[in-house]
Structure formats: C-alpha cells, structure tokens
C-alpha cells in the first residue's frame, strides 16, 4: 500500500490551542509512521507478504537475540 506524500493534521498544544498543519515529504512519512504506533501498527505490518518473507528470518533473529524486548507473562 502506498502512503500519501503529504498529510494535513489537526492537533492541539498542551494548553489546548488547536492548530492545523500540512506536512510533505519526509515529515509526512515520519508523522504517519509515528501515528501508526498509536494504533499498534509496526513497520513490518505494512510490508507485502513477499517483502516480509525476505526479512522474516532477520526479524526472528532480533527477537531471539533480545529477549528483554518480549512482553512479560503475568
């Protein structure tokens, strides 16, 4: 899925002042990436099955080599 190269956002400051902002290029890409995290979406979730298949072994190795990143069982 292709992402838009530009986005318009509506947000507010910590004091509640509302504003609108248009982001293009790299800034738009970063915003969309970070916004995905709020929805629990990771970068590999957006990859095609074909692309994910080419790196799945490396992703699995990262998890295996860094078990501290795994959720703790309750």
Image (tube, rainbow, N blue to C red):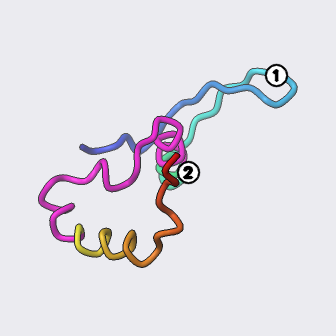
Q: Given the current orientation, which residue lies at the most extreme front position? A: 74
Examine the rendered structure and indicate whether residue 35 appears above or below residue 52: above
Q: Secondary structure at mark 1?
A: loop
Q: Are marks 2 and 1 in contact (CB under 8 Å)?
A: no
Residue under pointer 1: 17
Image location of residue 52, percent across then percent down: 21, 61
Range shown magenta: 31-55
Magenta stretch encompasses residue 48: yes
Q: Quadrant of the N terminus?
A: top left
- Label 2 CA crowd tier, 10 Å (few <14, some 14–19, many 20+): some
* Percent x, y of residue 34: 53, 46
Q: Relative to residue 33, is residue 61 depicted above or below?
A: below
SS category of the residue bearing label 2 = helix
Q: Is residue 54 magenta?
A: yes
Which image quadrant for residue 14? top right
**Residue at mark 2:** 27
Who comes first in sequence, dot 2 or dot 1? Answer: 1
- Residue, x 23% and y 73% (percent of image)? 57
């Amino acid at each position: 899925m292709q992402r838009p190269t530009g986005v318009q956002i509506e947000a507010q400051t910590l004091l509640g002042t509302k504003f609108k902002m248009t982001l293009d290029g790299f800034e738009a890409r970063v915003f969309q990436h970070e916004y995905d995290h709020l929805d629990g979406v990771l970068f590999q979730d957006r990859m095609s099955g074909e692309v994910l298949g080419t790196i799945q072994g490396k992703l699995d190795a990262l998890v295996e080599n860094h078990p501290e990143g795994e959720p703790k069982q309750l």
